[in-house]
Image (cartoon, helix red, strand yellow):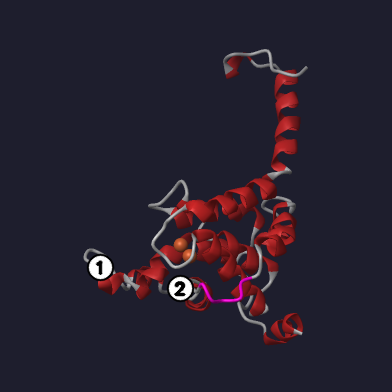
Amino acid sequence: MDKVSFTQMKDGTKEDYEFLTAHEIDHTKHTAKRLLKALSELDESLSGYQITRLGHSVQSATRAWRDGADVDWVVAALLHDIGDIYAPYNHDEYAATILRPFIREQCAWVVQTHGDFQMLYYGHHLDGFDQHKRERHRGNPYFDDNAQFCERWDQASFDPEYDTLPLEFFAPMVEELFARTPYDPEVIRPGAREPLVDDAVAARRAA
Ligand SMILES: [Fe+2]
Ligand SMILES: [Fe+2]
């Protein structure tokens, strides 16, 4: 079989659906590659900044890496703006949806709501923006993590002079993350909080 027999889903057979499931599993193996390609396409989006969206993404991940953050944090930093291409009005939710099955809940939440936290840095300059929009999340156990994510990695990563590592450096981490079993409780670890900064790891990586 190289194609299913049906033209309407309701007419499909068990054989059809088993065939499609096998296909789908194969397709999902290449998610990391497709995301890295999508990320490279961010190079053409959103002009006006001193660096491209790709440059910003890789710089955010580089800062996370140099802070000694774990792989979940580094990949979260790398992909946090991937929604800019197709979802300019909820790019944070879009990115979180991609990451959620494969990443710690803490990181998924931070990516999902980082847009509200980022407003702290520019909302007061624009009409109709609430600089303190992040306050609606006050009380969330990951509030401080998001504040730190934005302060250290997101809002700071628009510097064309920064010594940013290449995208290829992060490719194995993206591959590792998306090769995980989706929704594995050992990965999601609801409520667990890992630090964004680990000085000992940072020192090892700098050596
Ligand atoms: Fe963003
Ligand atoms: Fe960003």
The image position of residue 84, as x and y in percent, is: 46, 53
Is 72 positioned to the left or the right of 50 in the image? right
Instruction: Estimate the spatial distance between the alpha carbons at disc 2 and disc 1, rounded to whole Å.
Output: 17 Å
Q: Is residue 26 magenta?
A: no
Q: Nearer the viewer, residue 19 or 89?
A: 89
- Label 1's element? loop
Would you name the residue on which mark 2 appears? 155
Of marks 2 and 1, which one's residue comes earlier in the chain?
1
Q: Mark 1 highlights which residue?
A: 126
Corner quadrant of residue 126:
bottom left
Q: Residue at x 59, y 65 (%)?
A: 58
Q: Position of residue 149 (x, y in %)?
A: 52, 73
Is any atom of residue 79 visible in this view? yes
Q: Is residue 189 left or right of residue 204?
A: left
Q: For the residue labelled by badge 2, is the local secondary structure a helix, a strand or a loop? A: loop
Residue 92 drawn at (x, y percent):
47, 57
